[in-house]
Image (spheres, rainbow, N blue to C red):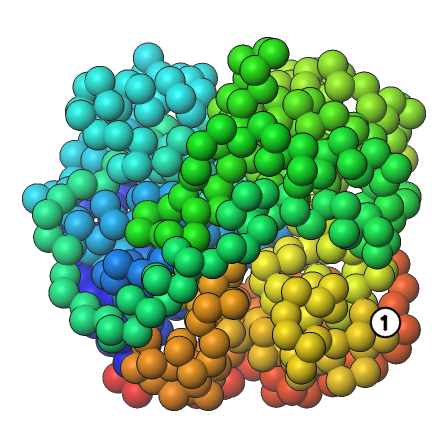
């Protein structure tokens, strides 16, 4: 089986020390990326850790496909205990960081401890250096990137940064890379902020050799030749379609379609796109550098989830207003989905839907924890009672689009996800719109026959996050191709993915999570029976817990 290579670089930012250790057994058994980060986190982070405490550890890792020249491989994974969900959580980001990370020669990097002053941590193939940067306190993403390039000659493609949101430990703060790409979900930016680390840079010339099969060139060529709509509109191409089928959350989840969808549609985004945008080595080029000529506003995006959160869910029907919200979140280091939903909750409480000036003020207040922003920075699950709004979260995580009240299998997947309300954990919506071939499609309504497929999709996506392979490769990398690329049987890969899910669940169980957390803020037909079927498929207990014996049975023999 193909897997990432290199030792673990363990960095204590409190002591300003580092050491390396071999993790060959972990890499050989868990491929790379999310699986390796999850295994290390499960075994090395105390089960009772404070997510914002010095003992929480942040893991960064790539996979074997970052050693290819194939499209859909410009991504990497980050893992820690989430300040938002209070559970073990992985998030991944695109951009250009992954190749610079592999060039350091490390298979994974671990950060622990907490610094007594603001730091940039520089990781190279020659070691680790610590730079005190008190002058960067409060700096936004572009300012940090400019400083690093001016002082160290490293572009934003070498950096992981946090904005004011991370420094102020907003529970849904992002890690930013390549300036406008985000490890968005779950608040991992707050983990770095709690450690008083403003940025991490990666550079070197020691990329390990991992031979990827020639099939990579077929995938790359097909991606380059494809005439997919995402090349023009990214995921924003979904907006009007989702509204038409009643799957677009609107006015803080009170409606399922939006009269103003045309004003925030993929067509409007495409009109603002002024050049191609891509991730490292990817010919699919689905990113969205956009510019509004009238105001001079430039950003990347917005993608569909941002269009939902700051558009339809906030009652906004002008794409330029959504672009500004997107730009603010990138500069301040905030997850656009959670931030937009949080803002929408406040708008609902004040009957202020569509108040664009208020929306942009609230984003600033959240990042700096000013005024009501200090409350909103805690996330909906912690303030909904105070604002007297419904709690639109699962496990503390705010909802994306692809509404489960219409796409019932996606609803079940929101409930079972160890990350909480996250659409990419199982990516079940693709089967129900459908965005796949007819033979793979499933009816939107009902849950019959869907729990085993949710399990398979969760396991598969855990492997993609470990390889690391973009989810939008689904039209180009099928089961057979994935097996060929990773030199492993498909069922064996799914088994490894299942072990990742088991470890996440087991860790979260030790923190008190169980079946009561696998819930939704709405009813689905036969939901409890489907949940029981899901647990049985995974071999879990009826209360949504996984035994230590099951996790240990899945460990490598020499672990």
SS for dot 1? loop
Q: Nearer the viewer, residue 149 or 68?
A: 68
In the visual, does 73 lie left or right of 102?
A: right
Measuring from the top left, give residue 362's x and y in whole percent. 70, 21
Does the rendering let one see residue 149? yes
Q: Is residue 494 above or below residue 53?
A: below
Determine the residue positioned at 79% across, 64% down: 407
Q: Quadrant of the N terminus?
A: bottom left
In the visual, does 552 lie left or right of 356?
A: left
What is the crowding at mark 1: few (fewer than 14 residues within 10 Å), some, or many (at least 20)?
some
Measuring from the top left, give residue 406's x and y in whole percent. 84, 61
Q: Nearer the viewer, residue 317 or 78?
A: 317
In the visual, does 244 lie left or right of 296?
A: right
Does the rendering let one see residue 60? no
Q: Nearer the viewer, residue 29 or 54?
A: 29
Q: Quadrant of the C terminus?
A: bottom left
Numbered marks: total: 1
Determine the residue positioned at 72% across, 45% down: 239
Measuring from the top left, give residue 506's x and y in whole percent. 54, 71
In the visual, does 454 lie left or right of 22?
A: right
Determine the residue positioned at 40% across, 78% down: 481
Q: Is residue 484 above or below residue 291?
A: below
Q: Nearer the viewer, residue 117 or 84?
A: 84
The residue indicated by pointer 1 is 445
| Quarter of image, res 22 | bottom left
Measuring from the top left, give residue 218's x and y in whole percent. 33, 69
Determine the residue positioned at 51% across, 85% down: 550
Q: Is residue 363 above or below residue 436?
A: above
Q: Is residue 24 above or below residue 377?
A: below
| Quarter of image, res 535 | bottom right
């Amino acid at each position: 089986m193909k897997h990432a290579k290199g030792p673990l670089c363990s960095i204590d930012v409190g002591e300003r020390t580092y050491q390396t250790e071999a993790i060959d057994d972990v890499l050989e058994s868990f491929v790379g990326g999310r699986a390796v980060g999850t295994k290390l986190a499960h075994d090395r982070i105390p089960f009772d850790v404070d997510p914002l405490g010095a003992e929480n550890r942040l893991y960064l890792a790539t996979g074997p496909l970052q050693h290819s020249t194939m499209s859909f491989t410009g991504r990497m994974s980050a893992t820690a205990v989430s300040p938002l969900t209070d559970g073990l959580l992985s998030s991944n980001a695109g951009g250009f960081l992954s190749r610079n990370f592999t060039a350091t020669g490390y298979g994974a990097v671990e950060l622990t401890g907490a610094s007594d002053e603001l730091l940039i941590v520089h990781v190279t193939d020659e070691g680790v250096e610590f730079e005190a940067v008190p002058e960067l306190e409060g700096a936004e993403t572009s300012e940090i990137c400019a400083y690093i390039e001016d002082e160290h000659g490293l572009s934003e493609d070498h950096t992981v940064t946090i904005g004011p949101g991370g420094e102020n430990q907003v529970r849904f703060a992002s890690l930013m890379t390549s300036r406008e790409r985000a490890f968005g979900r779950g608040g991992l930016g707050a983990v770095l902020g709690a450690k008083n680390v403003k940025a991490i840079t990666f550079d070197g010339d020691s990329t390990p050799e991992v031979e990827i099969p020639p099939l990579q060139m077929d995938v790359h060529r097909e991606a380059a030749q494809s005439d997919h709509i995402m090349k023009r509109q990214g995921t924003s191409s979904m907006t009007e379609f989702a509204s038409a089928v009643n799957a677009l959350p609107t006015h803080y989840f009170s409606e399922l379609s939006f009269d103003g969808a045309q004003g925030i549609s993929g067509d409007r985004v495409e009109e603002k796109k002024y050049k191609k945008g891509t991730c490292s080595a990817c010919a699919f080029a689905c990113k969205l550098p956009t510019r509004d000529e009238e105001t001079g506003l430039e950003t990347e995006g917005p993608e569909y989830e941002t269009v939902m959160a700051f558009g339809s869910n906030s009652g906004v029907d002008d794409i330029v207003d959504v672009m500004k919200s997107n730009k603010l979140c990138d500069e301040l280091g905030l997850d656009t989905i959670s931030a937009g939903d949080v803002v929408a909750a406040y708008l609902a409480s004040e009957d202020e839907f569509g108040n664009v000036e208020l929306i942009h003020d609230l984003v600033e207040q959240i990042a700096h924890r000013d005024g009501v922003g200090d409350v909103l920075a805690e996330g909906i699950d912690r303030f909904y009672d105070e604002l007297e709004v419904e709690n639109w979260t699962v496990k503390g995580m705010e909802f994306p689009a692809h509404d489960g009240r219409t796409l019932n299998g996606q609803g079940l997947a929101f409930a079972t996800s160890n990350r909480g309300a996250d659409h990419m954990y199982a990516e079940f919506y693709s089967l129900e719109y459908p965005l796949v071939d007819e033979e793979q499609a499933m009816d939107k309504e009902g849950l019959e026959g869907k729990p085993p497929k949710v399990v398979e999709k969760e396991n598969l996506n855990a492997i993609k996050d470990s390889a690391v392979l973009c989810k939008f490769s689904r039209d180009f990398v099928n089961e057979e191709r994935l097996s060929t690329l990773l030199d492993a049987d498909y069922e064996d890969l799914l088994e490894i993915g299942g072990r990742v899910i088991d470890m996440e669940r087991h860790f979260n169980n030790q923190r008190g999570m169980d079946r009561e957390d696998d819930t939704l803020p709405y009813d689905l037909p036969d939901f409890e029976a489907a949940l029981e079927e899901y647990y049985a498929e995974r071999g879990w207990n009826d209360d949504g817990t996984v035994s230590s014996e099951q996790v240990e049975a899945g460990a490598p023999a020499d672990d």
